[in-house]
């Protein structure tokens, strides 16, 4: 009889822990869904010379740029799939993997 009460308690505890886990995960999922594409006219993007396509970078204006540099091989790009991904520099925004900005740093190979 007492084993039966213990089983119900354990089951209730498991259900509560599962519900708490689901509640904790939901805000993280909605945060990633709220990311918007970074535009070149964004004030921070403009200050850092962000270009959605690295091929359009003016080397006279940005002499540190090299044609092999882009967001896809920058250490600041977060892992993921698709052409638009999160970058550690532009919080809450998605950068194009073909883009570039002047804080580009080669990702370790
Ligand atoms: S820091 Fe790197 S990944 Fe982020 S926008 Fe600049 S070049 Fe792209």
Image (tube, helix red, strand yellow):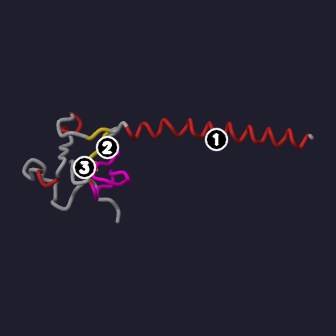
The residue where tag 2 is placed is 89
Q: Residue at horizontal 71%, vertical 42%?
A: 14
Residue 31: x and y, percent?
A: 42, 37
Q: Which residues are magenta?
A: 72-88
- Residue that carries the numbered disc 1 in the rendered image: 18
In this rendering, position of residue 20 left or right of residue 32: right
Nearer mark to the viewer, of 2 and 3: 3
Main SS class of the magenta portion in the image: loop
* Residue projecting furthest to the right: 1
Residue at horizontal 29 percent and vertical 48 percent from the top: 84
Q: Position of residue 41 (x, y in %)?
A: 17, 36
Q: Secondary structure at mark 2?
A: loop
Q: Secondary structure at mark 3?
A: strand
**Residue under numbered circle 3:** 96
Judge whether residue 76 is colored magenta: yes
Labels 1 and 2: the sequence-earlier one: 1
Q: Is residue 107 above or below residue 31?
A: below
């Amino acid at each position: 009889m007492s084993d039966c009460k213990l089983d119900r308690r354990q089951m209730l505890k498991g259900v509560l822990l599962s519900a708490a886990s689901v509640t904790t995960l939901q805000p993280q999922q909605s945060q990633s869904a709220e990311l918007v594409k970074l535009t070149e006219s964004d004030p921070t993007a403009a200050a850092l010379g962000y270009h959605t396509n690295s091929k359009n970078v003016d080397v006279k204006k940005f002499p540190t740029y090299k044609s092999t540099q882009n967001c896809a091989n920058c250490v600041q790009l977060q892992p993921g799939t698709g052409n638009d991904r999160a970058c550690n520099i532009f919080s809450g925004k998605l950068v194009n993997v073909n883009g570039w900005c002047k804080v580009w740093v080669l990702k370790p190979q």
